[in-house]
Amino acid sequence: MRLVPGFLWLALILLNACNSKDISMYVDPNIGGVAPLLTTKNPTVHRPHSMVRVFPVTKPGLNDRYLSDKIYGFAVNMPAYRMGHVTELMPTSGKLIIDKNEYASLYDHDQEEVHPWYHKVLLEDSNIEADWTTTERAVIYRFKYTSKDSNNVILRSGRKASFKIIGNNIIQGWEEFEKTRQFFYAEFSEPFGKSGSFDSGKIKTETEIAGNGVGVYVGFDALEKPVEVRIGISYIDENQAAANLRKEMSDKAFESVKEDSHQIWMNELGKIQVEGGTERQKRIFYTSLYRCNERMVNISEDGRYFSGYDGKIHDDGGRPFFVDDWLWDTYRSLHPLMLILNPLQQADMAESYIRMYEQSGWMPGFPQFYGDFPAMIGFHSAALVWDTYQKGIKNFDVEKAYEGLKKNATQATMLPWRSGPMCSLDSFYLKNGWYPALPEDSAETFSKVDGFEKRQAVALTLEHSYDDWCLAQLAKALDKKEDYEYFMKRSKNYRNVFNPATGFMAPKMANGKWVTPFDPQLSGGVGSRSYYAENNAWTWNFSVQQDIPDLIALLGGKEAFVKRVDALFNEPTHISKWQFMGQFPDATGLNGMFVTGNEPSFHIPYLYNYAGHPWKTQRRIREIMDMWFDDRPLGIPGDEDGGGLCSWYVFSAMGFYPVTPGSGEYAIGSPFFTSVKIQLPNGETFSVIAKECSKKNKYIQSATLNGEELNRPFISHTDIENGGELRLVMGDRPNKEWGTNP
């Protein structure tokens, strides 16, 4: 890939931004603030991929944060996505109260202003206006008091922590998080008139305290102006937190930092310019793109980083160290989207995975700053590395990456929500080619199996088959012929769990017999976890991304396959819907048995393209996006998972989607906009022009790519990175002849 200097790329983005509306104003961080069933979204203020991510702390344990009546404090940071915050502060007036349930204040969204770079609320009970903005490793909170005296700021922890008040305007300390520490250094713009600490509900005069759930307070004499609290964070130590604060905020006014952050978001969001569509669609689109830029997170600090993978501080060698990723969710579309928009950053992310392997001995799956979080199934670092390498991004240690991936594939346990060496169940898989299932009413015989997550035997087999395919392609590219043949053979293991008698990928026992009785909708317990992951057999039946032609053949050929996909979208629940959702709480956004809000479903609407019926993909995509996404708090149809679901929306709204990361191919859908222009880092532009596109005109009548007739419902990554134009003529009735030859 040819890259242009960073200043030229920035100039191109700025020039484009100057000629268009400030698209950053379309972003509403409150979209997703009410969950359809499980987890909600925070209205997070941060810079793209930055260490600092902050938000108001609302009712503890209340999932639907937008609906909380009160604010209980403000986060110093969220160090790990969706895992809570570390340390919080709260301004109060009047008598000093340290019980957060008593000093919590009502707030009103109608009095709120919120953007990715700035948030302002009115704490109604104390009549304090609070607003904040951030840099990469620091945050400024500004509190405008109306009371002339008895004004305070309270800092507290929820875990083991240490606080120390220094002089008359500094507080520093740390809070423990998963056996590691986040350090902070807070500088106040006004001198303290009083200060002290508290523990177990008791106020103390000591200015230094450590323990569980402790905190400190400071008070101010007569105030004539707002109090600013500037906080630097670090995973190295308090001194580095102070250095981060000075480097990023020294001598900068609040408004200057705010405007810098606004400009950064304008530039980032401006990489994709859309025209046409509705204002609602643009709000959903750009809010989704904002969500895609939350992770991974760069935790390098002045050329160093703390690694939770060996507990040491390392020089970063001039390359940032990225953490906070959930690959089961993000390999599908978030990483492919970032590969288009920022390929060099993606190479740094791949290199970060390699460093984690070198430091811990395993390739991680859900890497956090404190180490790997052993969640979900598969080793999708294989997809991340191969997709990056296959698309021409090679400035990382690919041989070391392959070493780590091969070790995971041949020596690591496959058990859900577990990490470490293989067990006997894994050995069975390597020998026989499927993960052994147990009848649903059987007691688990292996102690290492998680009591809630179960074996997920069919899903494990399917996910590892895809990961083995990715690893096989990388082996081939590195001229490792024997490894290529070995992993390609393993990539066919999905065939071992296909039961032709039922037409479903189904649980098979160690003796080679199928589990009976078997209900493809309800078998497997909560989330069908005995056999699948979070979804039932209807969803997992289509999880063969690496060999879709063979999947089509298994399901009876193209016409039969299309009927099976149609049936997925029309299969009713066999029990009442409230009972079904109780068993499948992740299955949100239901169209029949199609689950809009969960990752294994993402590619399914595009599968019609592979069976000669792309017009059905066009119809389904529009139906799903119109029905299940909105520009309101209840606007995200499932657990967003840090860019997983939102990146699906961004791709689909643009009109194409990476069904098989690692293939270099994108399936064409039905764009929402008459014009989509992607500013590429090499100075080129890739455009999708959908002539006459509208709510009714969702069907592709004809297509050209760079002026040449296009009859396949696919484009390649090379088509995009070289720049060019995909031009679609849209109509209100399907052209069933277009794109019928995959």
Image (cartoon, helix red, strand yellow):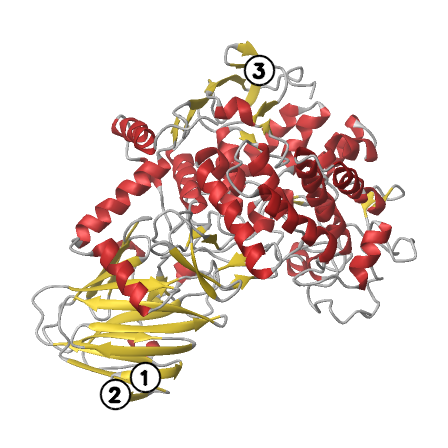
Residue 198 vertical placement versus 690 (above, below) = below
Q: Is residue 640 visible?
A: no
Few, some or many residues within 10 Å of mark 1 (<14, 14–19, 20+) = many
Residue marked by disc 2: 206
Discs 3, 2 touching: Cβ within 8 Å: no
Residue 187 x %, y %: 21, 67
- Type of residue at label 1? Ile
First in sequence: mark 3 vs mark 2: 2
Residue marked by disc 3: 701
Residue 581 vertical placement versus 674 (above, below) = below
First in sequence: mark 1 vs mark 3: 1
Discs 2, 1 touching: Cβ within 8 Å: yes
- Type of residue at label 3? Gln
Discs 1, 3 touching: Cβ within 8 Å: no
Residue marked by disc 1: 209
Few, some or many residues within 10 Å of mark 2 (<14, 14–19, 20+) = few
- Alpha carbon of mark 3 to alpha carbon of mark 2: how far? 75 Å
Q: Quadrant of the C terminus?
A: top right
Q: Residue furthest top?
A: 708
- Type of residue at label 2? Glu
Residue 275 x %, y %: 38, 26
